[in-house]
Amino acid sequence: MHKDYYQILGVNKTATEEEIKKAFRKEAHKHHPDKSGGDEAKFKELNEAYQVLGNKERRSRYDQFGSGFESGQAGGQQANWGGFNGGQGFNINMDDLGDLFGGFGDMFGFGGQRTQGQRKSRGGDIEVRLEIDFIEAIFGSEKLIRLNKSVVCSVCHGNGAEPGSKIDTCSTCHGSGSVNQVQRTIFGQMQVQSVCPTCQGEGKKITKACHKCSGNGATKETTELKIKIPAGIDTGESIRLTGQGEAGHKGAQAGDLYIHIAVTSDKRFKRMGTTIFSQAHITFPQAALGTTIDVVTVDGEVSLKIPSGTQSGKIFMLRNKGVPSLRGKDRGDHQVEVIVDTPAHLSRKQRQLLEEFDK
């Protein structure tokens, strides 16, 4: 019976390879038998269609002879579906299935071909919260932090073997770290490569485990690390130190250390980006007559000229007295809001003078 593979995948006959792959992944995700409402028969049919249309040579024969070509009905052409066991399995490209339920290989308990370096577990990341004060965030500083983490064993240097002991090549995988197995799946039989169960992907077996780490290659220790805090950092920003996390498994890459910054408040200042805000209080005569006052900044006190007739709420700008840019050489400004204080208690003479002034 002729099958319309284009119709099964929902594409037209002029579809590109990318459009065919995209359509297959979409439909396979929808009809996967492990998913609620999935359809195993439809899933197999989709795979059958993709095995043909996803291959340039098979698609060309299909376009010429129809779906009968795979059973030798078109000029004796026999499609090679499985590659073993008389063609009763399927050759699946794991990459074509993408991230279906976290990866096709994970659904069946096996993965694609990997190197020994990929099999070794990367060390875990570490996240810590570091509190710094306002001025430290503005100008940067150095902090000493203490971590209790997994580090490379100082005795075996990460290989897990007692110094001087013999390390043999694994007799099961002959040093490759992987073995070939045939597994039954919903597609039929598949030949896959999996991690060697004897050496767990190491490709070698130690004859005597390290006395300090018991063969793990790493131990838990308390370490101290000096951290450089960059000028201009703010609350919510993080510092990433590559390779300063947990040690990897037997020489694998170490994880990273993420330091999440929290800046404590300062009652004298407010900050928004690279701009600092503060207030300065002056008297009514100072506002009316003008004066010069000392203003506190993160750099220390500076003189600020107040012109006569200054109104309460007036903003004065102190250029380049703000926060350094975290990713550049520029520096923000400091805005000073002047508050004119109205006297709450006046002497009789002061009242008379103000009344005369008002007239």
Image (tube, grey):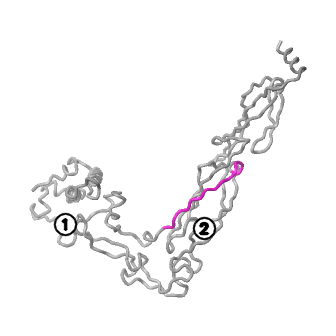
Mark 2 vs mark 1, CA separation in Å: 56 Å
Foreground label between 2 and 1: 2
Visible residue check, residue 56? no
Q: Nearer the viewer, residue 188 or 61?
A: 188
Q: Is residue 132 left or right of residue 353?
A: left
Q: Which residue is mark 2?
A: 148
Q: Which of the 4 quarters of the picture holds residue 98?
A: bottom left
The stretch drawn in magenta includes residue 128: yes
Q: Is residue 172 left or right of residue 358?
A: left
Residue 240 in picture, x, y percent from top left = 57, 58
Q: Which of the 4 quarters of the picture holds residue 171?
A: bottom left
Q: Is residue 159 above or below residue 273?
A: below
Query: Which residues make up the magenta segment?
Result: 122-136
Q: Which residue is mark 1?
A: 80
The stretch drawn in magenta includes residue 265: no
Specify the quadrant that holds the N terminus: bottom left
Q: Amino acid at mark 2?
A: Asn
**For numbered disc 1, what is the local secondary structure?**
loop
What is the crowding at mark 2: few (fewer than 14 residues within 10 Å), some, or many (at least 20)?
few
Q: Nearer the viewer, residue 49 or 341?
A: 341
Q: Is residue 311 above or below residue 248?
A: above
Residue 123 in picture, x, y percent from top left = 51, 67
